[in-house]
Amino acid sequence: MAHLTKEIADTLTQVGVHSAYGDPVQLGDATIMPVACTSYGFGAGEAGAGTEGEGSGGGGGGMAVPVGAYVSRDGVTRFEPNIIALLVVGVPFVCVAGRALARVIRALKR
């Protein structure tokens, strides 16, 4: 199992920044390069000798949130955000930050 975990880690190291930036696409007079925020996680487990049954395990997952694209048009490149994805990611953050700030203010009043 330890070898499998090392192989997965080596593979992810080779993937690197290519997982966050897509291949450029030509669309009319513009070149578009998509950008995503990516995350990976993996785990493994194994029961030791002397247990009643055999055991092993493993799991993994990943996610990618499309945050926008770099658009090159007429010699000018600019980042155009994906507003919907930013709202989906930002709203929970703002809610948690608001609750935390309210608790800090309430604690300071006492």
Image (tube, grey):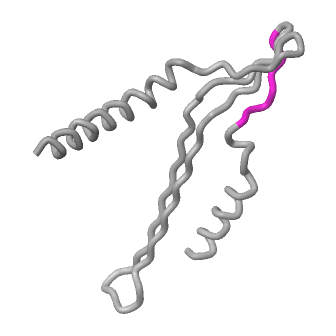
Residue sticking out furthest to the top = 28
Quadrant of the rendered structure where residue 46 is? Answer: bottom left
Query: From the image, which quarter does the C terminus lie in?
Result: top left
The verdict on residue 61 being magenta is no
What's the magenta region?
A: 21-27
Q: Is residue 73 left or right of residue 9?
A: right
Q: Residue 65: percent from the left, percent from the top?
A: 55, 33
Query: From the image, which quarter does the N terminus lie in?
Result: bottom right
- With respect to residue 79, does 52 lie above or below? below
Residue sitting nearer the eye, 79 or 31: 79
Quadrant of the rendered structure where residue 28 is? Answer: top right
Query: What residue appears at the point 76 percent right and 18 percent down from the top-left corner?
Result: 71
Query: What residue appears at the point 45 percent right and 31 percent down from the top-left corner?
Result: 89
Q: Residue 37: percent from the left, percent from the top?
A: 59, 38
Residue sticking out furthest to the right = 75
Residue sticking out furthest to the left = 110
Residue sitting nearer the eye, 94 or 29: 94
Residue sitting nearer the eye, 6 or 55: 6
Query: What residue appears at the point 84 percent right and 16 percent down from the top-left corner?
Result: 76
Query: What residue appears at the point 36 percent right and 31 percent down from the top-left corner?
Result: 94
- With respect to residue 97, does 33 lie above or below? above
Residue sticking out furthest to the front = 109
Q: Residue 59: percent from the left, percent from the top?
A: 48, 59
Q: Is residue 31 left or right of residue 97?
A: right
Q: Residue 100: percent from the left, percent from the top?
A: 27, 41
Q: Is residue 46 left or right of residue 3?
A: left
